[in-house]
Amino acid sequence: MRQEWESQIAEMRKGSVRGLARLITRVENRDTGWLDAMQIIYPMTGKACVIGITGSPGAGKSTLTDRLTRELSDQGFKIGIIAVDPSSPFSGGALLGDRLRMKEVSTIDDVFIRSMATRGALGGLNLAARDVVKIMDAFGKDIILIETVGVGQDEVEVVKAADMVLVVCVPGMGDGIQAIKAGIMEVADIFVVNKADKDGADQAVADIHAMLDLSADEASVKIPVVKTIASTGEGVTDLVRMMLQNFEAGRIRTSWQKERIKEEILSLLEKEVARHLRNRWDQNGNLDQAIKQVTARKQDPYSVVQEMISLMHLQ
Amino acid sequence: MNTEKKIRVLVAKPGLDGHERGARVIAYGLRDLGFEVIYTGLRQTPEEIVSAAIQEDVNVVGLSILSGAHLTLTRKIIEKLREQNANDILVIVGGIIPDKDVPELNKMGVMGVFTSGTSIKDVGAFIKSNLS
Ligand code: B12
Ligand SMILES: Nc1nc2c(ncn2[C@@H]2O[C@H](COP(=O)(O)OP(=O)(O)OP(=O)(O)O)[C@@H](O)[C@H]2O)c(=O)[nH]1
Ligand SMILES: [Mg+2]
């Protein structure tokens, strides 16, 4: 098992795009041994810059990602893209359409795009997104862009995966401002007012500045607000310059590092424990049994859980 | 121990053909059957389709062609998949395909051909039975 993973990782490290793609699939699927695989990969990581791109649905995140990639790729950076779209809660399937807006960069040699479905995860990312970032890093990508689901609020998961977060807003209808209010303020390292070809772009910029001034204290760094027209590329050069400046100035989320690591360990643990339990229940039929009991009102869900926990010797 | 596995399908429209409805019907339909569908839109070159298929590590490439150019386009795509050692990916074709061309497509390696009136359930069942 471990050998199989090792040879796959070696193939990826040699630069095989197919190898990279397949490794991502297996880790995303939590194939047996995936934790061992990530242990091998982890020491190969730590070089790439990770940029999160979030914002309301249809704000232009994919179009902007395409433009940023062109610009950064022209400057010689190797780019990896993770584009997340929601899974259907009913069928478990997904329509992954971000790539539709990334046609032009999809065949550039040093660009690798991977679409991912949320597969039930909340917060705008896929559970394996952080692992996929590491795999792309180990492959040799310099910059990894993560486009989150367009949620509009609460999609702060990306902060835990990224060194820098762009929040994309659009002018008009109070939309941009609404999105910011919902707690997204704190996650932005750069605000982008996209669709600046539309009425109200300057107003949106002014509104965002006003909000930022309200919450800023003396010590905090000034958060830039940039106007772009992703569909034509206007403003993107400025945005890229600002992003690279941020990196050079070390204005990245290093202060979050401890929090991030703690959170990563806890969430991995939580998911792995739950997964193991579910797998075991699926096999031994205990879950079906419990469902039957509760349906017949012979037992309640609370005592089911308590029993399961005591079986784990956690109490 | 592999509960998270999903079948991934690329639905692509090669060439200059602008008939998008069939591809959309199939993309949404497969999503509703539980597949993860990557939809790349109109006017894709064979190169774009093959590189998307490889990066996304799909199990299936579904081509939607109503332009009449299905033979040349499909041949190109299958050749390029083979160049990349990716001929294990299941290729299916849908759209306006005259019956007389089906054997030729099969000979290239196309596993299934689906013309107008195709039910999405049949496509889903075909994919599942040909992958396992
Ligand atoms: C609607 C239509 C249009 C619309 C398209 C709107 C749009 N955005 O989609 C408009 C008016 C724009 C149009 C234009 C043209 N059209 Co037109 N059009 C049609 C028409 C009447 C219906 C197509 C349709 O949407 N069907 C509904 C969908 C749901 O069915 P479907 O596409 O067949 O898909 C089903 C199956 O084929 C299959 N399937 C399809 N794709 C896939 C993929 C996979 C992976 C799988 C598994 C299955 C699958 O499953 C689907 C669901 O059952 C057909 C005639 C016909 N009856 O098919 C002509 C037809 C396709 N058009 C034709 C032509 C010639 C043209 C034009 C060149 C006309 C002209 N001279 O200007 C232009 C070209 C436009 C362009 N840029 O490509 C010809 C094509 C001839 C050929 N291939 O030999 C047809 C067949 C008409 C004819 N009998 O001559 N057209
Ligand atoms: N007018 C205008 N339209 C734009 C601009 N940027 C993107 N669009 C359009 O806005 C629509 C949505 O763009 P996407 O890039 O798909 O937006 P998104 O945020 O990725 O969308 P989701 O992933 O679905 O949330 C597309 O039709 C784009 O062409 C812009 O600067 N100006
Ligand atoms: Mg998008």
Image (cartoon, rainbow, N blue to C red):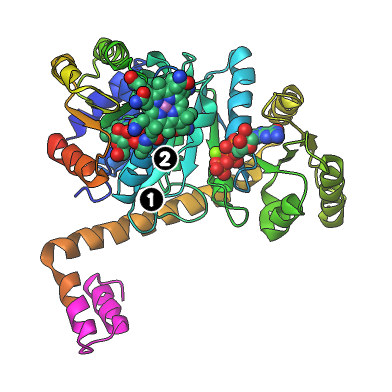
Q: Is residue A51 left or right of residue A32?
A: right
Q: Residue at x 29, y 77 (%)?
A: A305
In the rendering, at what x and y percent does residue B54 appear?
Answer: 34, 23
Tell me if mark 1 has few (under 14), some (14-19) or many (20+) residues whose alpha carbon lies within 10 angstroms of its own: many
Would residue A48 be visible to someone looking at this image? no
According to the picture, the residue beneath numbered tag 2 turns out to be A116
Quadrant for ligand 2 reads top right
Please say if B25 is above or below B110: below
The residue stretch that appears in magenta? A291-315
Subunit ID for the residue under disc 1:
A
According to the picture, the residue beneath numbered tag 1 turns out to be A119
Same chain for the residues at labels 1 and 2, yes or no?
yes
Identify which amino acid the numbered label 2 is placed on.
Met
Q: Residue at x 28, y 44 (%)?
A: B6
In the rendering, at what x and y percent does residue A172 appear?
Answer: 77, 48
| Main secondary structure along the magenta-highlighted residues | helix
Marks 1 and 2 close (CB-CB < 8 Å): yes
Element type at marker 2? strand
